[in-house]
Image (cartoon, grey):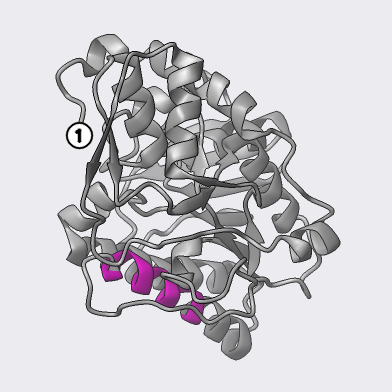
């Protein structure tokens, strides 16, 4: 039995990872400052004897004894990471320094949950790990994009300089149960608007694309990367290469919910990527991983989850 630290353990991805690692027979220390993470995400696990939950912000050091670290702590939706951009950057940069320092002291491996946002508004499509990206370093999204890029730099420098065992994964758009209904991300926005028969807000003309990975697939890819030999550092893209326009996503959600929602169009936010699609050849070859759940099936599961969340979110939806 390993004792495994998950920063951001009460978040969307972190809560699913907690469940996976507990099912694998591990002890889990879920650390979260509860800025975007929620105890409700761990409701089904709180009575598990091998789960410990600790409220802590990784912008300050953490001294614990563990066998592995998954560093997932960070607000991930534009609404949340732009609310306090300085703290967002601190979470990525100082958080990486503190977690890498802990991994160095304990001589253990550590996984960094990076993001497809390191590619910015890509000029290469689909995006392979070798692509350096096209990021505006002074724009409103830079606190997240550049924070994650700097965190990757720190991971590889700690690896080269201090021989820390690292795993870096680049996460593409992920969706599923435990997303916040008001987090401003496109899947949650569209579903909540559709369930309330409200106009579905599309930014730009709706032709911009994303590739959506269901959360269970993502967690399997993350776990597979952590099990690789020490020679495998990444970065490795983890995402679903199925590419859909915002119009296609909206129309599918309207169909699945039976909604009466109409589409409304608003200006595209600054630096919003026009297209996003992962090249997952490394994940297939190195990890033997590829997603199994298609968009329609994943949306059905996600809609069913959000239908249970409607009462507490009426009147609180961010449009």
How many marks do you count on the picture? 1
Quarter of the image for residue 216 reads top right
Q: Closer to the camera, 224 or 250?
A: 250
Question: For the magenta stretch, what is the residue range?
Answer: 142-153
- Rendered-image quadrant of the C terminus: top left
Q: Position of residue 174 (x, y in %)?
A: 52, 43
Per the image, is 92 magenta? Answer: no
- In the image, residue 282 above or below residue 315: below
- In the image, residue 316 above or below residue 60: above
Q: Give left or right: position of 65 versus 280.
A: left
- Rendered-image quadrant of the N terminus: top right
Residue 194 visible to an observer of this rendering:
yes
Q: Position of residue 145 (x, y in %)?
A: 37, 68
Q: Closer to the camera, 136 or 269?
A: 269
Q: Give left or right: position of 211 versus 233.
A: left
Task: State the SS at label 1.
Answer: loop
The residue drawn where x is 77% and y is 71% is: 230
Q: Which residue is mark 1?
A: 319
Main SS, magenta region, reads helix
Q: Closer to the camera, 31 or 192?
A: 192
Q: Position of residue 130 (x, y in %)?
A: 64, 80
Q: Give left or right: position of 229 versus 208.
A: right
């Amino acid at each position: 039995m390993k004792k495994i630290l998950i920063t951001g353990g009460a978040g969307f991805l972190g809560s699913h990872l907690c469940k996976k690692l507990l099912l694998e027979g591990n002890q889990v220390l879920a650390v979260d400052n509860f800025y975007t993470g929620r105890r409700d995400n761990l409701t089904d696990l709180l009575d598990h004897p091998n789960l410990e939950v600790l409220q802590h912000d990784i912008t300050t050091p953490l001294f614990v004894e563990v066998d592995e670290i998954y560093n997932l702590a960070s607000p991930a939706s534009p609404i949340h990471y732009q609310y306090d951009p300085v703290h967002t950057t601190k979470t990525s940069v100082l958080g990486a320094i503190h977690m890498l320092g802990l991994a160095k002291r304990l001589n253990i491996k550590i996984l960094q949950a990076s993001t497809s946002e390191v590619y910015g508004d890509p000029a290469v499509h689909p995006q392979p790990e070798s692509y350096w990206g096209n990021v505006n370093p002074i724009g409103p999204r830079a606190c997240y994009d550049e924070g994650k890029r700097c965190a990757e730099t720190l991971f590889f420098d700690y690896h080269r300089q201090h021989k820390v065992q690292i795993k870096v994964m680049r996460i593409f758009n992920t969706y599923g149960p435990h997303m916040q209904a008001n987090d401003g991300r496109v899947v949650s926005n569209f579903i909540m608007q559709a369930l309330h028969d409200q106009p579905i807000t599309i930014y730009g003309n709706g032709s911009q694309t994303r590739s959506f990975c269901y959360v269970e697939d993502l967690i399997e890819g993350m776990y597979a990367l952590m099990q690789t030999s020490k020679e495998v550092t990444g970065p490795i893209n983890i995402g679903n290469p199925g590419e859909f326009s915002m119009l296609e996503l909206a129309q599918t959600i309207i169909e699945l919910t039976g909604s009466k929602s109409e589409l409304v169009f608003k200006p595209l936010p600054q630096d919003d990527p026009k297209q996003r699609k992962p090249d997952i050849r490394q994940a297939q070859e190195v990890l033997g991983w590829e997603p199994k759940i298609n968009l329609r099936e994943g949306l059905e599961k996600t809609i069913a989850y959000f239908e249970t969340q409607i009462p507490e979110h009426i009147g609180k939806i961010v449009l």
